[in-house]
Amino acid sequence: MRIAVLGTGGVGRALAGRLAELGHDVTVGTRDPAATLARAEPGSFREWADARPAVGLASYPDAAAGADVVFNATPGDATLDVLAAAGAGSLAGKVLVDVSNPLDFSAGFPPTLFVKDTDSLGERVQAAYPDARVVKTLQTMNNSIMVHPESVGGTAFVAGDDADAKAVVTALLAEMGHADVLDLGDITGSRGTEMLLPLWVRLMGVLGTAEFNFKIVR
Amino acid sequence: MRIAVLGTGGVGRALAGRLAELGHDVTVGTRDPAATLARAEPGSFREWADARPAVGLASYPDAAAGADVVFNATPGDATLDVLAAAGAGSLAGKVLVDVSNPLDFSAGFPPTLFVKDTDSLGERVQAAYPDARVVKTLQTMNNSIMVHPESVGGTAFVAGDDADAKAVVTALLAEMGHADVLDLGDITGSRGTEMLLPLWVRLMGVLGTAEFNFKIVR
């Protein structure tokens, strides 16, 4: 499957690397590929990408235009800007997997949520790109667990208005090892999973690790 | 242990019944005991209490005054009124176990939260009764699971400023069968667990049952 991963940070790298390893045709999207590759310090995207020659790099619109499935792996406060750069035309008809959280660090730590309770970032993305088929998923766990859930287990939630898009995403989740995928219904299900983040941040503090996950036992 | 349970609804009955069964001296608190006992229809508190003669019934202040540990098992939008009726004097020095959620049903279903993100109902209770030792716990699961967690398992969170009070509550949780109690630190930990409720409500809808629980796998 042709997959674009928008975002060169930790979440983007984890997803792009794992999906390429599983045999998909993966292109990472960034604002300015030349600028991204110009930085070659330890820990840079360039260093990461040099070790993964199968993963492509392209501008946001080029990456999205060439893909069947587009992952948004950008910070929540950058998400709508990045999707605007990708362009509605490139996103139309695509499965748009939203892995962002509406975290607001403007008042320091812990972050608050800049949208919540009666709306969500997943809904805002769907409203801004009505021709994309948005599926909210995976943003309730650390990126290490997103791509290797067998490490601790837990539940992956999916929410979205398009059943076929959710089926595509659920199949990708299964490929990555997710044994418990729970369908929360339409995109308004994003509210509950985004509102998990304050507890997630608190747990990271008290447990001293991000290697944990939410599991719905039933 | 002398325990008061404020609230005659499903949560109050579940906790009072189970704690009495475990051998504690339990008194349920209500606004007007005579009025509560005057209603004897099927499903009434009177019917429930007649089957449990060991459980006492008293006014909010009398129930709280006679107890070492006070459970607030009232709806979130009634909590501060009920605690005011119990009185600061009756609550001073007591372990006050807050099992409420700040659910706002004024716009229908699903409920929203009337406090969240930068504050919580647990914090408001502690701020209103600085001499009480508030511990937020159990309100992330259905009352059936609060008192018989072995049915599905899961994690019980505790948050509060007083370590001794959390130890008392943790021991009561263990008596009820909670095998995984996770200390979230001070009372601001209430924010994250109260913000689980939107997902809890959503899950009840998609799963068609309240017999599930959150488990932190790690």
Image: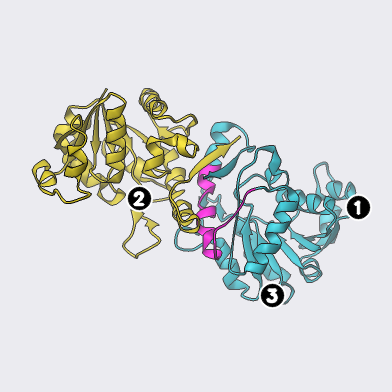
Chain colours: A cyan, B yellow
Which residue is rendered at x = 50% and y = 37% of the image?
Answer: B153
Number of marks drawn: 3
| In magenta segment, residue B79 | no
Q: Is residue A63 left or right of residue B28?
A: right
The image position of residue A29, as x and y in percent, is 78, 61
Mark carried by residue A53: 1
Q: CA distance from mark 2 to mark 3?
A: 39 Å
Task: Check the residue under mark 2 and report the chain it is in.
Answer: B
Residue indicated by mark 3: A88
User: Where is the N terminus of chain B found, in terms of image quarters?
Assistant: top left
Give the residue type that dot 2 points to.
Pro
Range of residues picked out in magenta: A180-200
- Estimate the x, y position of residue A143 in percent, counting from the top left: 69, 46
List x then y, in percent, for residue B44.
19, 48
Local packing at callout 3 (Cα closer than 10 Å; few below 14, some 14-19, many 20+) is: some
Image point (17%, 27%), residue name:
B66
In the rendered image, residues at marks 2 and 3 fall on the same chain:
no
